[in-house]
Amino acid sequence: MHAAYKKKLSGLRLPLRVLERVEPIVLLLQDHAYKTAEREIALLFVESIKKIKNGEITPKEADAYFTALGILIEPDDELKLSKAIQDILFVGELFHDVGKDLSPDIQEAARRSLAILMGDPSPKEMHKKSAQTRMPVMA
């Protein structure tokens, strides 16, 4: 883990696996590989939902990935990301609220993530494909 990242995250006490998972995304952004970074963020979101559903991680643990990204992504780089990814990052930072009355719209963020992973199909195609692809429902 890069020393500058450790300094930014020093007070959070994040597990090493979180840091190891988000560092490649941050490096992609630093290299201005925005589309690849967006796909990685979308994949991380979908993976997080799957792992929560399978009991591999808690919503709070999933939240840690997106909190780390929120801290490590430079504001200039974040502005160059699509609105869909900015929304996914925001919802990801709220995974800890899953199951509460004011929980974020995980399903909408999951649909957006899948659309990005499928190459941003048109809304009509996305609806057709998302009907065929069932996302795990989160309580």
Image: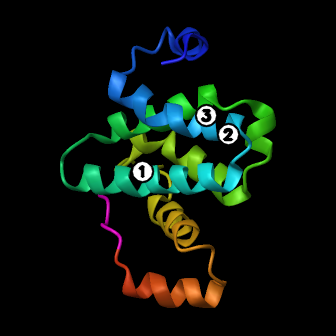
Q: Please report whichever mark, 3 or 1, sits nearer to the chain's N-terminal start.
A: 3
Relative to 125, is 9 above or below? above
The total of numbered circles placed on residues is 3
Colour scheme shown: rainbow
Image coordinates for residue 19, horizontal then vertical, percent = 43, 26
Q: Residues within 10 Å of mark 2 (few under 14, many from 20)?
A: many
Which residue is pictured at 52% across the width and 15% down the height? 9
Q: Which mark is residue 29?
A: 2
Which residue is pictured at 41% across the width and 58% down the height? 46
Q: Identify residue type, mark 1.
A: Asp
> What's the CA distance linking mark 2 and mark 1?
34 Å
Q: Which of label 2 and label 1 is nearer to you?
A: 2
Mark 3 secondary-structure assignment: helix
Q: Does the magenta run of residues contain 137?
A: yes
Q: Which residue is mark 3?
A: 27
Q: Quadrant of the C terminus?
A: bottom left
Q: Which residues are magenta?
A: 135-139
Q: Does the magenta run of residues contain 42?
A: no
* Residue situated in front as seen by the camera: 55 or 21: 21
Image coordinates for residue 67, horizontal then vertical, percent = 52, 31
Q: Which residue is mark 1?
A: 101
Asked if the residue under mark 3 is in contact with the one under mark 2, i.e. CB atoms within 8 Å, the reply is: yes
Image coordinates for residue 72, horizontal then vertical, percent = 61, 27
52 to the left or right of 26: left
Image coordinates for residue 54, horizontal then vertical, percent = 19, 54
Mark 2 secondary-structure assignment: helix
Q: Identify residue type, mark 2.
A: Leu
Asked if the residue under mark 1 is in contact with the one under mark 3, i.e. CB atoms within 8 Å, the reply is: no
